[in-house]
Each structure stands twice: as structure tokens, then as C-alpha cells.
Amino acid sequence: MNVAEVAPQAFQAVLGLEKYVRANVEHTVLALVKLRASMLNGCAFCVDMHSRDALAAGESDRRLFAVATWREAPFFDERERTALALTDAVTRLGEHGVPDDVWDAAAKVWSEKELADLLMAVATINVWNRIAVTCRNDLPTEV
């Protein structure tokens, strides 16, 4: 199914969220968040798209590969680490929600507005992942 064709108003609403987070979340952090959530959700289409976009924007392949094991990799600063931890917690949201230690660590290095925008970024990529995985968006064989 092509949601953009079948439910264009709904698609435009999600696209509005996407435009908001692109304008309000630092580009490098947003790229890491999108890639990490897409990995956790098993969205090959989005992993491919966001890794290619990040490379084109100048991100290093080494950092992108390390997103899969970000806790052990030395390539991420404190803000990026807290963004990745929050991405993990929100994407894998369990019955007890986001752990206090994850939220508190993020709140120490992000302003309240930045944290709200970061949360919207994580929520938005999770919506896109769920649409792409459910609708089985094909991974492009050539780019």
C-alpha cells in the first residue's frame, strides 16, 4: 500500500512532523536517531535511506556503522549518547515507560525545548518505520 496515495491527509500530517523535527533538531543528532530507531525496528528501507543521507551530508561511515553498538563505541559525545539512549528507550517502550535514569541523563544535557524536540524526532521516525515496515516498502536496488 502507498499510504501517501490512499490517505494523503494522514501522510501530510506525518510529513508535517518530519519537517518540524528537521528544522528543530541538530542535523547530526537527527541522523543518528533516525538510523538507530530504524535499526531497532528492522526497517531496511529506512536504514538504507538514512545511512545514505547521512553519508551524503558528511557523516563518517565508521560512526554510522557504530550506531548498531553505540554504547561500546567511543565515537559519540554525551549529547549524542543521551539521544541514542532515549531513542532506544522510546522505540522499545516497555510497560514501565522510559527509565528515569535515561530521561534524567538526557535532561541534564538538553534544554527542555531541545528534549521535547528530540522526543518528537524519535516519535516521528518510529511512525515512519511502522508505515514502511507494515507496507513493505521495497529497498531500492539501485541508487
Image (tube, rainbow, N blue to C red):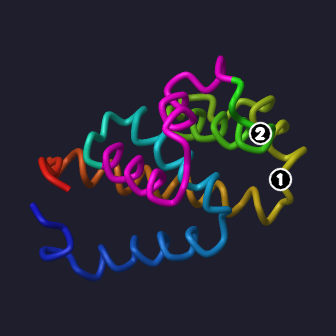
Which residues are drawn in magenta? 46-73
Q: CA distance from mark 2 to mark 1?
A: 10 Å
Q: Specify few, some or many for label 1: CA neighbours under 10 Å numbering under 14, 14-19, or 20 or more.
A: some
Total tally of numbered discs in the picture: 2
* Res 63 label: none
At label 2, counting other C-alpha atoms closer than 10 Å, the crowd grade (few under 14, some 14-19, many 20 or more) is: some
Q: Quadrant of residue 81?
A: top right
First reached walking from the N terminus: tag 2 or tag 1: 2
Occupied quadrant, residue 89? top right
Nearest to viewer (mark 2 / mark 1): 1
Label drawn at residue 103: 2
Tell me what residue is drawn at x 67 percent, y 62 percent: 26
Q: Amino acid at mark 2?
A: Trp
96 lies above or below 6: above
Q: Secondary structure at mark 1?
A: loop
Q: Position of residue 21 (x, y in %)?
A: 57, 68
In x, y percent, where is residue 94? 54, 29
Three-letter amino acid code at the position of disc 1: Trp
Q: Main secondary structure of the magenta part?
A: helix
User: What residue is at 71 percent from the left and 35 percent from the top?
Assistant: 76
Q: Residue at x 74, y 38 (%)?
A: 82
Return the residue at label 1. Answer: 110
Q: Is residue 64 magenta?
A: yes
In front: 77, or 37?
77
**Is 52 displayed left or right of 2 in the figure?**
right
**Foreground pick, 53 / 43:** 53
Residue 31 placement, left or right of 6: right
Indicate the quadrant containing the C terminus: top left, top right, bottom left or bottom right: bottom left
